[in-house]
Amino acid sequence: MFDMITNILTNLVSKPATRRYPFEKREHYRDTRGRVGSIDIDSCIFCGICGKKCPSDAISVSKAKKTWEIDPFKCVVCGVCAEVCPKKCIFMNEEYSAPVYKKETLKHIQQPKPVEEVLQNLQQPKEA
């Protein structure tokens, strides 16, 4: 009986054993693999190496259409795509994916460059 009263009094005056989750969020550990964060679509060359190396076949790349797609429900967040990318345009994020109610793929499409920019690049003399 004495042990129980001691335990009750100790619990009344001490801090809670758990974190008050919605109000106090724990920071992620460094190098946590949360999800594929973003892709710099303008520097992507659409080589498809990331899709070939993906163990869960979550990434599909189309060089002709200039599209890059990832299915977040197939992705196992291994980070291989970010490691093998020759242009280093895929970035991993430390945040976890938010819950969703509908399956969707994330599709990135490279927009064509403005005509003025293309003409300017053609008119500039090439350096030797």
Image (spheres, rainbow, N blue to C red):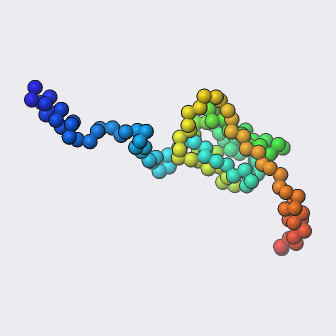
- The answer to whether residue 54 is left or right of residue 123 is left
In this picture, is 113 found above or below 67? Answer: below
Kindly give the residue lying farthest to the top in the view shown.
1
- The answer to whether residue 31 is left or right of residue 62 is left
Residue visible at 68% across and 44% down in the picture: 50
Whole-percent x and y of residue 108? 73, 44
- The answer to whether residue 110 is left or right of residue 84 is right
Whole-percent x and y of residue 85? 67, 50
Kindly give the residue lying farthest to the left in the view shown.
2
Residue visible at 64% across and 48% down in the picture: 38
Residue 5 in which image quadrant: top left
Of 86 and 6, nearer the camera is 6
Of 80 and 106, nearer the camera is 106
Residue 81 in which image quadrant: top right
Residue visible at 21% across and 36% down in the picture: 11
Give the quadrant of the C terminus.
Answer: bottom right
Residue 116 in which image quadrant: bottom right
Give the quadrant of the N terminus.
Answer: top left
In this picture, is 53 found above or below 3? Answer: below
Q: Is residue 80 visible?
A: no
- The answer to whether residue 124 is left or right of residue 41 is right
Q: Is residue 127 visible?
A: yes
Whole-percent x and y of residue 34? 54, 42
Residue visible at 41% across and 42% down in the picture: 23
Q: How many marks?
A: 0
Whole-percent x and y of residue 114? 85, 57
Kindly give the residue lying farthest to the bottom in the view shown.
128
